[in-house]
Amino acid sequence: MLEKIKNSKGLMLVLVPHLVWIGVLFVLPHIKLFGLSFVDRRSGEVTLGNYMKFFESELYRDVFMHTALFAILVTLITLAIAFPTAFIITKILGKKMKAALLLGIVLPYWISELIRVFAWMVLLRETGVVSYMLQAIGVTSQNIEFLYQNGTIVIGLVYTSILFMIIPIMNSLDSLDNSLIEASYDLGGNFWSTMKEIIIPHAAPGIMVGSVMVFMLNLGNYVTVTLLGGKNSLWFTENIYNQFIVRFNHNQGAAFGVILLTFSVLVVWISLKVTGQDMAEAM
Amino acid sequence: MTQEIDVSVSNLTKQWGDVKAVNNVSFDVPKGSFFSVLGPSASGKTTVLRMIAGFETPTAGDMFIGGQRINDLPANKRPCNLVFQRLALFPMMNVIDNVTFGLRRRGGIDKAEMERMANDVLARVDMKGLNERKISQISGGQQQRVALARSLVLDPTVLLLDEPLSALDLKLRQDMKLELKRLQARMGTTFMYITHDQTIALAMSDTIAVINFGKLEQVASPDTLYREPATHFVASFVGENNRWNNGKVVELVDEKTCRVDFGGILSNARMGEKLQPGDNIDLFIRPEMILLKPGKQKPGSLGKIKEINFDGSHSLVVVDLVESKIPLSINVKLQHTEETPEIAIGDTVTLSWGRTKRPAANAFLHIEPPTDEEE
């Protein structure tokens, strides 16, 4: 059956939308971006100048480091929240509770990210709900601004991306036969050793997929970071936006884009190597 | 000398809502014995095992291993190990790491010593030279061996086995069955084996506990269980039997035996429970205990051969009893020997049973059969 489909000429036709998607919207723009990044804006000559600018400028480097570290931090925090959540939902709770909680996690994602971030702004702004509540119960006597701080950005990013961590981990935990956990206890294992030897190794592909997705989403996030962090967000995507839109320097923006892309590929590659996993296997 | 008891269970009960999955079960497992718990599916046998292993909490009753009460011990502290039905080997580890898993949890054993212990027990289960293989790279029979080794290496007081052979194909299951029994005899570890497969239980066990609807029906040696079933259920569940419903007790012959009447055919039967003349009874007759002779002979009951089902070493012969006032037929297991008479469908034969010390027929008070069986 599959062999027949494999040999049929019409198969490629079905793949056309996908190939167009990859080719026109992904590969071509990246080639163009890559090309642009090596061209001087004024003279049009081939140059490494756009990259030199990044490495020479302390500001760009700092913003980049800040973005990278926070993206990693947010990924780790998301993992720390998502793993226990996924574990409890898949392994501890009954079927009904499981469905209800899963729906609760997915439901907010039916609304656009922009709207969800605005909701956070309503909560956290100086004249917002949280500030008002704190005054009402007498914790403080004046308005408190919760927006435009690193902590707020972290909260926002964790909130925005946690679904993409929970779902793959739940998938991998779902496929873990409960009798393996019982066998570990039977042979003298306790909670921690079972976690370390059985559960986490089994869930590792899910953890990896979730972490890669969340990390990428965070590193390239613009909306959440800009709205919750304002001008002080120091997120690298803001620099790319500025180069392209504000300063109309496509070449510089392209160089920044390539740097960000290279970095994220590098981080994913290193973490796959460190955890001894295969991308194809993990996905 | 009184026999040492390794596992003792008293008045064990497990209730789920209104259902008593295990109902007031008590038994003792002698040290070094092969003890089976036999029952149909959903009889509560697995629940008994899981309570002993520590994965379910009993509603009532006590459990002891080696004299120590284990009710309040967590699963990982109990001196017993479980071989799971689907084995539950760790797929993320290779063979040797699976076997040393329990040793590593204990701590205080150096790595070389652990490997020596693991290799030792792997050799005992005939699993040499595959230490580095992943679980997915070894066969089903080999996985059985690794699962056994993984538990045995911890030298448990009792090894609990939850039908681990049921996943194997018939041939392998029969080989493993014998091997398991030899292994048990060699190692002297007490085995407690849960199964719904009576051929496994009868072949391997020193003692069998039969359980049905959560209740213990009988605890006995395979031989006793087979020849002298204590309850109606054991008689119908263990081994093949002819079952005739709705007979009458005519008289009591002695303390154990009564004379029963089925449509005019009279038979001696062992009384499985206390019976009085006039009681309405069901009669169970072992097909292999019936003597079949060609032609009209005395004593015995005349019959006419209806079917012959050839099965190699024996034939299953269905005989209509012509002297009966009600339509009555009986299955006879005819062993093929040099003296076996030549028979054909339609032949007249004489059947007799119950003339030796070994009981061929067992009588129990009549119980309505669960489905409308004929005969």
Image: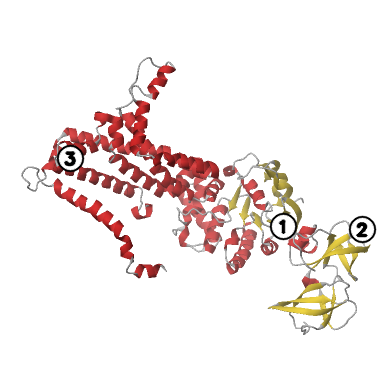
- Spot occupied by residue A212 in the image (x, y as percentages of width and height): 34, 45
Residue B14 occupies quadrant: top right
Number of on-image labels? 3
Residue A190 appears left or right of A41 = right
| Viewer-side residue, A239 vs A263 | A239
Q: What's the distance in space between the residues labelled 2 and 3, CA to CA?
A: 103 Å
Q: Residues within 10 Å of mark 2 (few under 14, many from 20)?
A: some
**To which residue does mark 3 refer?**
A244
Name the secondary structure under disc 2.
loop
- Spot occupied by residue B201 in the image (x, y as percentages of width and height): 68, 61
- The type of residue carrying mark 2 is Gln
Q: Residues within 10 Å of mark 3 (few under 14, many from 20)?
A: some
Label 1 and label 3 in one chain: no
Confirm whether residue A68 shows in the render. Answer: yes
Instruction: For mark 1, name the chain.
Output: B
- Spot occupied by residue A199 in the image (x, y as percentages of width and height): 47, 46
Circles 2 and 3 in contact, beta carbons < 8 Å: no
Q: Is residue B214 above or below residue A247?
A: below
- The type of residue carrying mark 3 is Phe
**To which residue does mark 2 refer?**
B276
Q: Is residue B320 above or below residue B170?
A: below
Name the secondary structure under disc 1.
strand
Q: What's the distance in space between the residues labelled 2 and 1, CA to CA?
A: 29 Å
**To which residue does mark 1 refer?**
B208
Circles 1 and 3 in contact, beta carbons < 8 Å: no
- The type of residue carrying mark 1 is Ile
Name the secondary structure under disc 3.
helix
Residue at the (75%, 83%) spot, across then down:
B338
Q: Viewer-nearest of labels 2 and 3?
A: 3
Q: Residues within 10 Å of mark 1 (few under 14, many from 20)?
A: many
Looking at the rendering, in which quadrant would you find the C terminus of chain B?
Answer: bottom right
Residue B94 occupies quadrant: bottom left
